[in-house]
Image: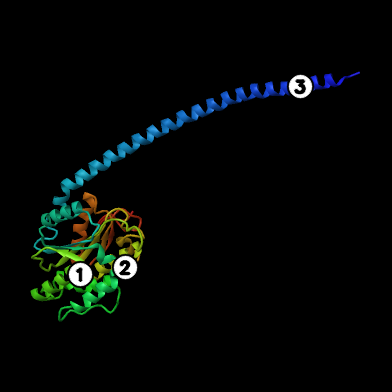
Amino acid sequence: MISLRYHIISIAAVFLALAVGVVLGSTTLSRTVLSGLSDENGDLGRQVSDLEAQRNGLSARLADADSFAATVGPLAVRGQLDKRTVVLITTADASPADRDALKNLVAASGATVTGELQLTEAFADPAKADQLKDIVTRLLPAGVVLPTVTDPGTLAGGLIGPLTLISKANNQPQASPEETAAALTGLADGGFIRTAQGLKPAQLAIVLTGGSAEGDGAGDRAATIARFATQVDRSGAGTVLAGGPGSADGAGAVGVVRADTAATQILSTVDNVNTPAGRVVTILALREQLEEKSGRYGIAGNAQAPAPGTPSS
């Protein structure tokens, strides 16, 4: 007769066998898994090393390309703007290095920079829009007619454009020196611009901006700069809006212009002014503006070509 003790010993033996099997099985499985993971880790390490080598190679090639463009840039633009005049307008986020490099290329092209004007952060601040519009309408010189639209960027361009650019029709200033000084002083006192003494109106303008706008109201700020540059273009012989990385996306001023068919028909844009090649393209696009042509240049997806006269990709 089978006793209770026999049953207990039998059940215990079964559980002991199961436990031993689990331990032995898990040990074998762990070794297999660890071996597989070790192999995968080695493969990933080799892939990372290969990618780092490719990145370093591409970085070196890019550095060589930038060095080449910086070297030949003055030669490429020589004579393109001979005896022309250019005014440089910068936004609050524009790079001083880009500004200085553009000034050097303008000089190399044979043109003269007649002055610089900086738009402050308040200029594109949606909270200051009504104040800006009020100052613009009060400071309007006699003979200058503002556009009928009421957004702050277009209205400000309707004032600053004629102050900084000579008339395309007769190459004459569009406001008297006294009117220009009074209007610029009023805008500066309002905190919307900064300008050095001696600014004179030019034939052409470069509006230099930074990259993609960020934070609250980014889209409104980008739209203000885009519409301002477009209206400035209407005031003289030509204007180029040049921006850095991200400027051509939806939250950048260049991107806002490129999304507006009417604007792209007159205003040229460059989306890689942070590179030596992009700065050369800015000068070439300014030359193209004198021929009443416009284009979307650079490396962004919404650019039509890398530079004027080159086929689109």
User: How many residues crowd mark 3 within 10 Å: few (<14), some (14–19), many (20+)?
Assistant: few
Identify the residue at image location x=24%, y=42%: 63
Residue 252, picture quadrant: bottom left
Q: What amino acid type should be assigned to the residue bearing mark 3?
A: Ala
Three-letter amino acid code of the residue under disc 2: Pro
The local crowd at label 1, few if under 14, some if 14 to 19, many if 20 or more residues have their Cα within 10 Å, is some
Expressed as whole percent of the image width and height from the top left, the position of residue 78 reads 12, 54
- Amino acid beneath label 1: Gly
Determine the CA span between mark 1 and mark 3: 91 Å
According to the image, label 3 marks what residue?
12
CA distance separating discs 3 and 2 = 80 Å
Name, please, the residue furthest toward the bottom.
Answer: 142
- Check residue 117 in the rendering and tell me which mark sits there, or answer none: none
Proximity of marks 1 and 2: CB atoms separated by less than 8 Å? no
> Which comes sooner in the sequence, label 1 or label 3?
3
Q: To which residue does mark 2 refer?
A: 126
Return the x and y of residue 3 as percentages of the image width and height.
87, 19
Residue 37 location, x and y as percent? 51, 29
The residues bearing labels 1 and 2 have C-alpha atoms spaced at a distance of 15 Å
- Give 63 or 127, whichever is nearer the viewer: 127
Can you name the residue that lies furthest to the right here? 1
Task: State the colouring used for the structure image.
Answer: rainbow
